[in-house]
Amino acid sequence: MLTKCLFPAAGYGTRFLPATKAMPKEMLPIVNKPLIQYGVEEAIEAGIHQIGFISGRGKRAVEDHFDISYELEHQIQGSSKENLLQEIRQVIDQCSFAYTRQIEMRGLGHAILTGEALVGRDPFAVLLADDFCVSDGPGVLAQMVRLFEEHACTVVAIEEVPRDATQNYGVIAGDEIAPGLFRVSEMVEKPAPADAPSNLAIIGRYILTPDIFDILRETPPGRGGEIQITDAIAKQAEHGRVLAFQFEGRRFDCGSLHGFVEATNFVYQTRFIGE
Ligand code: UTP
């Protein structure tokens, strides 16, 4: 049973400065809801209710968001605005929240290792809230949980990207064992297009088995001088214990200005127009 999900949110978010000067980019709203709330809702839909945040600066904004604001609630109680807080109240009621702080930004792998204290020796999910995903059916994490329950190994979500974009992603190679499902043989972090083993790129959804922590402890800094989760998962892949899954749905890279604006337009068009 998968019950825990880590949300790394300690990055500097430099592409969104000055908006991210005093708050993590995961608090940026897509229309009226912060990215991180969409992420937590996706975890809940996948049956996961123990939420762990790895934060850095701006930790308070995340903590306050997933807490009750007595003053605000008192003010709007009984008014037509009360229902605007209903969704976040439901999220808060369904989950437990734990926090830890990544003191030095040493990469996503290091951020996940920092979360070991919140996860213990259980398998767990990792969701990067700046990869905002939508789907008509079950959410991406719910699709991955189904696979994890069947195969009991690490699962990463992938999508096809243009060949000339591989240097922005971790890229996999592997055998397709079922439509859209690959047993990973190789993973490379941010390869130049000429060196990329495929155009199948890893996006910000992972289910990891807890041996990843022992591997991460031994993983030296890689690309960009950072401890890369891709390098650690590549070690698991050497033993055939990693699946990559082409999820159903659509991803917006909300870590980039372009993706963020696209997601905003998409959500506004599909969920707000006509209300
Ligand atoms: P990014 O590579 O998008 O970096 O991190 P960033 O710092 O957030 O953004 P830019 O490039 O400066 O604009 C991917 C994810 O990994 C987390 C980030 O919070 C983001 O969710 N992360 C990254 C950490 O938590 N710690 C790190 O040391 C690095």
Image (cartoon, grey):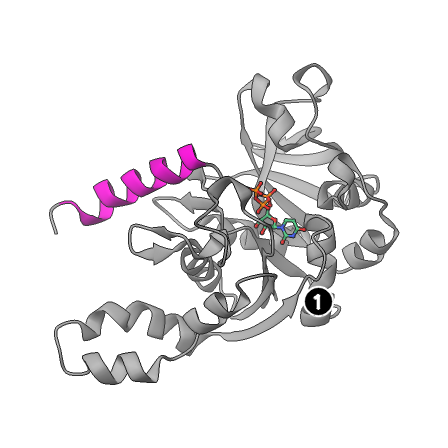
Q: Which residue is mark 1?
A: 122
Q: Camera-side residue: 50 or 260? A: 260
Q: Residue at x 77, y 46 (%)?
A: 227
Residue sitting at x 28%, y 39%: 265
- Mostly what secondary structure, the magenta segment? helix
**Residue nearer the viewer, 267 or 18:** 18
* Residue displayed at 70% across by 14% down: 194
> In the picture, residue 200 is in which quadrant?
top right
Expressed as whole percent of the image width and height from the top left, the position of residue 93 reads 40, 78
Q: Is residue 34 left or right of residue 159?
A: left
Classify 57 as above or below 168: below
Q: Is residue 12 magenta?
A: no
Q: What residue span does the magenta drawing correspond to?
A: 257-273
Task: Note whether residue 9 is visible.
Answer: yes
Q: Quadrant of the N terminus?
A: bottom right
Where residue 238 appears, as percent x and y from the top left, is 83, 39
